[in-house]
């Protein structure tokens, strides 16, 4: 895991759709910055983690609170896998955003503004 991040991560709770390896998954974005995301998703034990191995390309779609939809091209940086018997696997992913859209930058900027 790369602990030398260039951008501060902000805590969020956003439902997301992940497209990787020809499969579609549902997950939750738990923190976000202008260069990356931390995502948790639960899969069936038969689903392979190979879709999320480091350097795997992942498209992530989600909606920010303003209602705008964001579609990101990302690359997996790391994955932690936790088996929860009998029928699920919890995957924690760190992904790098390859191309930052304006609407996501604006959203992250509002999260970083001090409340006052």
Image (spheres, grey):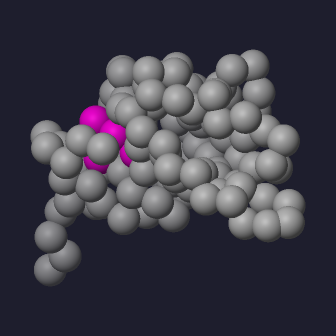
Q: Does the rendering let one see residue 104?
A: no
Residue 115 % position (x, y): 19, 76
Residue 2 % position (x, y): 24, 41
Q: Main secondary structure of the magenta part?
A: loop
| Residue in view at x 80 percent, y 49 percent | 45
| Residue in view at x 44 percent, y 21 percent | 55
Q: Quadrant of the C terminus?
A: bottom left
Q: Quadrant of the N terminus?
A: top left
Indicate left or right for 59 with 54 as reference: right
Q: Is residue 114 magenta?
A: no
Q: Nearer the viewer, residue 26 or 64?
A: 26
In the rendered image, which quarter is residue 94 located in?
top left
Q: Does the rendering let one see residue 11?
A: yes
Q: Is residue 36 magenta?
A: yes
Q: Nearer the viewer, residue 111 or 45?
A: 45
| Residue in view at x 69 percent, y 20 percent | 21
**Boundaries of the magenta span:** 33-37
In the rendered image, which quarter is residue 22 located in?
top right
In the rendered image, which quarter is residue 42 located in?
bottom right
Instruction: Give the number of callouts.
Output: 0
């Amino acid at each position: 895991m790369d602990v030398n991040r260039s951008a501060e991560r902000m805590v969020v709770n956003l439902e997301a759709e992940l497209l990787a390896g020809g499969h579609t998954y549902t997950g939750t974005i738990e923190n976000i910055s202008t260069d990356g995301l931390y995502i948790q998703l639960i899969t069936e034990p038969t689903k392979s983690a190979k879709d999320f191995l480091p350097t795997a390309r992942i498209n992530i779609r989600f909606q920010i609170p303003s209602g705008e939809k964001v579609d990101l091209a990302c690359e997996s940086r790391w994955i932690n896998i936790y088996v929860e018997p009998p029928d699920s696997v919890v995957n924690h992913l760190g992904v790098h955003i390859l191309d930052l859209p304006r609407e996501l930058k604006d959203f992250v900027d509002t999260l970083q503004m001090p409340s006052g």
